[in-house]
Image: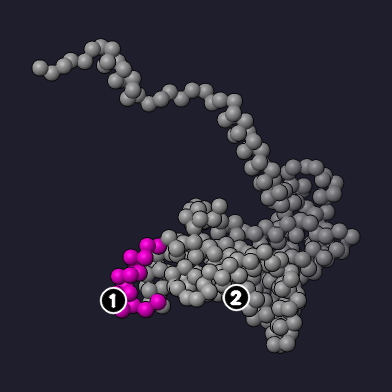
Amino acid sequence: MAATATPLETDLRIESTRPPRQGRPGLGRVLAWTALGLIMAVTLFPFYWMLRTAFSNGAFLATEPSNLLPVEPTMGAFERVFGLATTQEAQAQAGSGAAVNIGRYLLNSVVVATCITAGQVFFGALAAYAFARLRWPGRDAVFFLFLTALMVPPIFTQLPNFLLMRDLGLLNSYAAIVLPFFFMTPFAIFFLRQFFIGIPHEVEESARLDGAGPLRRFFSIILPMASGPLITLAILQYVQAWGEYFWPLLVGSEESVRVLTVGLGIFRAQTPQGSPDWAGLMAATLLAALPVLVLFAVFSRRIVDSIGFSGIK
């Protein structure tokens, strides 16, 4: 004879299946969201101020320095950056009137950043595979030596690299800007090595039994499985290469190889009326940052997931 549930047991069973009631948020949660909102506002305010200045008339910026809205809104700053404004129009809005080859600088930055990224990802993947999957004498000691290079400030290598580029006759060329960053870096090796270690050995073992050598296993098995981390590394290295300033300034002073960051510095140095063309400078900076912002907007989730999966905390 089947037992029948009492009304009390039935009510308790129904109550347990109901979703928990959402009460009012506690004080701690409210304070946490408030602090997060303040941090986001402080972080994003410089970008808003850059937009506000870029769309302002440079001749009137000093008259309303605390105004949160564009002062005498105009597109004149962007016209000056692209060379569409005449000398008289540029000077009327506190511009220098000098020509800025923004298209050439942008092309140079794309070429340099693309070459650096391609070299670092390819050679970094090869080195990371050797450290993670191959067994050879002194592997751990060499890897530790590579990691110690992360603690060396880059400025210490600028002078030796400059002397090397000068002796090779490569100054004022793409090669001089790209070569010191082209090959593997300690960060790239560490980043990819953490992922390669996590790949099960059985995946490679079956290919090895079929006669596949290390290079074939690397290109046929490891690289396809590491597409996510490789894309993440490429984005990170591209952003870093895009923002390089001192080294391209040191070895690429001619306009034919001048990158965008160096061009912005020269644009700022043009002071026709005693102060830089802040509106034009912010407009050029916005154009320079736009590709990087688009990359992060499109691949932000992939970057976070790959960094977490690679073990970087």
Q: Can you tell which of label 2 and label 1 is closer to the viewer?
A: 1
Give the residue at x 37% y 78%: 213
Give the residue at x 56% y 72%: 142
Residue 279, image x and y in percent? 76, 56
Q: Quadrant of the N terminus?
A: top left
Q: Where on the picture, by quarter, is residue 282?
A: bottom right
| Numbered range of the magenta stretch | 199-214
- The residue tagged 1 is 210
- The residue tagged 2 is 182
Q: Kindly tell me whether residue 161 is visible in this rendering.
A: yes
Density class for disc 2 (Cα within 10 Å; few <14, some 14-19, many ≥20) is many
Disc 1, SS: loop
Would residue 145 appear left or right of 91 to someone viewing this image?
left
Disc 2, SS: helix
Residues at marks 2 and 1, CA–CA distance in whole angstroms? 35 Å
Q: Nearer the viewer, residue 298 or 24?
A: 24
Residue 19, image x and y in percent? 38, 26
Give the residue at x 41% y 25%: 20
- Amino acid carrying label 2: it is Phe
Seen as rendered, the residue at the extreme top is 7
Q: Where on the picture, by quarter, is residue 148?
A: bottom right
- Amino acid carrying label 1: it is Asp
Seen as rendered, the residue at the extreme front is 137
Q: Nearer the viewer, residue 122 or 190?
A: 190
Q: Nearer the viewer, residue 71 or 130?
A: 130
Residue 87, image x and y in percent? 80, 66
As drawn, 42 above or below 229: above
